[in-house]
Each structure stands twice: as C-alpha cells, then as structure tokens.
Image: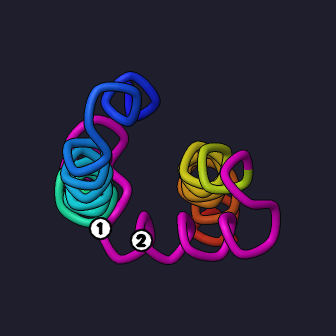
C-alpha cells in the first residue's frame, strides 16, 4: 500500500507510513493487551512484556508467538502447579 502511494506521490507515502506506524503502536500497546486480558485472561503488563521480549529475541515472528506462549505458560501454572501445591 505504501508502494502504491509512493508511486503516486512521495508525500502521501510518507503520510501513509506515519499513519501505519501510529496505528501499529496503538494496536500493540493499547488494543492487544485489552483483548488478550478479556479473551485469554492474560494481564496487560504480561502481554506488553511478552511482546517486547519476543520481538527483541526473534523479531516480528517472536512478537507474534510471544503472547500465545505467555498465555500457555500462565494456563499451565494455573491448572497444574497451583492445584498441586494446594493438594500438598
């Protein structure tokens, strides 16, 4: 989409690139943590920390995989480790 805008007008490509950058930041730091908190019961700070650490370690793929990985770790802790400790 940015390439099409660049072919038409370089100024519109810059504006579109800035728009996408702002949109992605709002989605990553505001929308995604709230959705994950409701859908998977993952606390918002854990979503942000997981996305940042996954992105730092493995790039975009790491950021995409980090949130489901964090949700699965939280699920395993809640369903396996905590009941075992309560039964002791």
Query: Mark number for residue 44?
Result: 1
Q: Can residue 67 be seen in this view?
A: yes
Q: Which residue is drawn at 22% across and 51% down?
A: 11
Q: Is 65 contained in the magenta span? A: no
Q: Position of residue 77 (x, y in %)?
A: 63, 60
Q: Dot 2 lies on which element?
A: helix
- Residue count near mark 1 (Cα–Cα under 10 Å), binned few <14, some 14–19, many ≥20: some
Quick one: 37 or 15, which is closer to the camera? 15
| Residue closest to the eye, 7 or 66 | 7
Q: Quadrant of the N terminus?
A: top left
Q: What residue appears at the point 18 percent right and 61 percent down from the top-left corner? A: 30
| Disc on res. 48 | 2
Residue at image position (31%, 58%) is: 21
**Residue 12: which quarter of the image?**
top left
Numbered disc 1: secondary structure: helix
Please name which of the two marks, 1 or 2, marks the residue nearer to the observer: 2
**Is residue 32 in view from this perspective?**
no
What residue lies at 59% left-to-right and 65% top-to-bottom?
82
Q: Do the residues labelled 1 and 2 touch (CB within 8 Å)?
A: yes
Q: Give the range drawn in magenta.
A: 34-61
Q: Which mark is residue 10?
A: none
């Amino acid at each position: 989409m940015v390439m099409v805008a660049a072919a038409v007008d370089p100024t519109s490509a810059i504006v579109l690139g800035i728009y996408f950058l702002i949109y992605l930041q709002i989605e990553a730091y505001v929308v995604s943590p709230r959705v994950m908190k409701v859908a998977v019961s993952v606390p918002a700070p854990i979503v942000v920390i997981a996305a940042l650490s996954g992105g730092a370690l493995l790039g975009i793929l790491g950021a995409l995989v980090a949130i489901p990985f964090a949700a699965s770790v939280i699920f395993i802790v809640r369903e396996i480790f905590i009941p075992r400790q309560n039964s002791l």
